Image: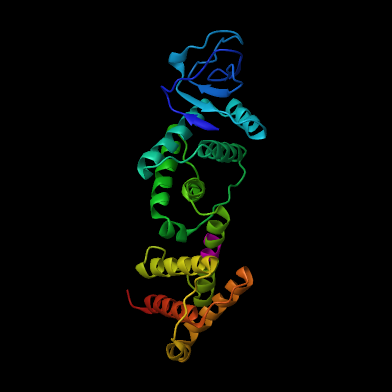
């Protein structure tokens, strides 16, 4: 599906199908399908009638095949107010991030939010996904996602559940990251698990707003990225490694647990240098927790 901005020429000649009062599908002489949207655009429109182009607010060019069928079905079923709200939220994100977010983001968010609202209307609990590391790793996308959730909530006159900014951030990352999705998802899951290991071992919930938390999360992100890129730290830090093992036994044990998790999850073994730096970060976190306020 390709988004065509308002004002871009679009062929409206030929057969068309009214999906609802606000959405019409046209087929031009080349067989290209377009979804045209505008308030009242399809009202009383006949299959061979003339489309009032002045009412067209947005146009999407449809791909052939199953995806095009799913998009037609979605636009037919979703309230037009939600369609306009999600499109507005995506445009807000594009302005904020200074780049196009691709043709699939509108569809992905429509699908997500419509399913969310359906569950809420049926009083079905909606699971949250707390990922404090996400706003450290991707602060720009997270900030924009918060604005998008606020925009959609305001447009619909109902507050989306707490934690939706996480899901919006993930959709933004899928639309903005050049790296393979599998790598990005693996790294994020790895960061979350490592944080969970540290919290369990220290018996605390780490302060996601603290500078030490941010440093630790970024270090783990880069560590996992080095694993993916096969460029782990190496050097001649054996003496420091032994000193840290003796001086910081709790932090060292946690670093070793992280090493075991990484080995099981990725099949790669952390070097002593990587374990050393993990130990230093964990020790810093534990000292921050034990320091008086």
> Does residue 189 show up magenta in the picture?
yes
In screen coordinates, is 45 left or right of 136?
right
Tell me where residue 18 sits by quadrant: top right
Q: Quadrant of the N terminus?
A: top right
Residue beneath the point at 42% across and 24% down: 6
Image location of residue 241, percent across then percent down: 46, 87
Find residue 75 and report its horizontal and vertical position in percent.
58, 28
* Closer-to-camera residue (9/3): 9
Q: Name the residue furthest left.
A: 293
- How many numbered markers are drawn? 0
Q: For the view shown, which residue lies furthest in the right direction? A: 66
- Quarter of the image for residue 257 reads bottom right
Residue 156 shows up from this direction: no
- In which quadrant will I find the C terminus? bottom left
Q: Is residue 182 visible?
A: yes
72 on left or right of 196: right
- Image spot of residue 142 (x, y percent): 42, 51
In magenta, the rendered stretch is 188-192
Q: In the visual, does 68 lie left or right of 103?
A: right
> Residue 281 lies in magenta, yes or no?
no
Q: Main secondary structure of the magenta part?
A: helix
59 lies above or below 204 = above
């Amino acid at each position: 599906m390709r988004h065509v901005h308002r004002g871009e020429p679009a062929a409206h000649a030929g057969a068309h199908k009214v999906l609802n009062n606000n959405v019409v599908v046209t087929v031009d002489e080349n067989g290209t399908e377009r979804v045209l949207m505008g308030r009242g655009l399809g009202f009383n429109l006949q299959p061979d009638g003339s489309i009032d182009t002045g009412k067209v607010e947005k146009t999407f060019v449809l791909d052939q095949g199953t995806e095009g069928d799913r998009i037609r079905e979605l636009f037919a079923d979703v309230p037009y107010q939600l369609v306009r709200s999600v499109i507005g939220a995506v445009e807000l994100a594009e302005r904020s991030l200074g780049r196009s977010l691709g043709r699939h983001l509108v569809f992905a968010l429509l699908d997500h939010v419509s399913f969310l609202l359906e569950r809420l209307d049926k009083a079905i609990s909606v699971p949250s996904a707390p990922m404090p590391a996400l706003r450290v790793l991707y602060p720009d996308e997270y900030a924009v996602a918060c604005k998008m959730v606020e925009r959609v909530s305001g447009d619909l006159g109902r507050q989306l559940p707490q934690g939706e900014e996480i899901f919006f951030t993930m959709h933004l990352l899928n639309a903005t990251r050049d790296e393979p999705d599998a790598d990005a998802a693996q790294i994020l899951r790895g960061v979350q698990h490592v944080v969970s290991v540290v919290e369990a071992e220290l018996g605390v919930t780490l302060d996601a707003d603290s500078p030490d938390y941010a440093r630790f999360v970024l270090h783990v992100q880069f560590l996992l990225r080095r694993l993916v890129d096969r460029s782990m730290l190496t050097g001649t830090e054996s003496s420091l490694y032994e000193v840290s093992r003796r001086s910081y036994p709790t932090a060292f044990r946690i670093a070793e647990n992280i090493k075991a998790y990484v080995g099981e999850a990725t099949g790669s073994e952390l070097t002593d240098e990587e374990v050393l730096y993990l130990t230093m970060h964990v020790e810093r976190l534990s000292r921050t927790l034990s320091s008086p306020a």
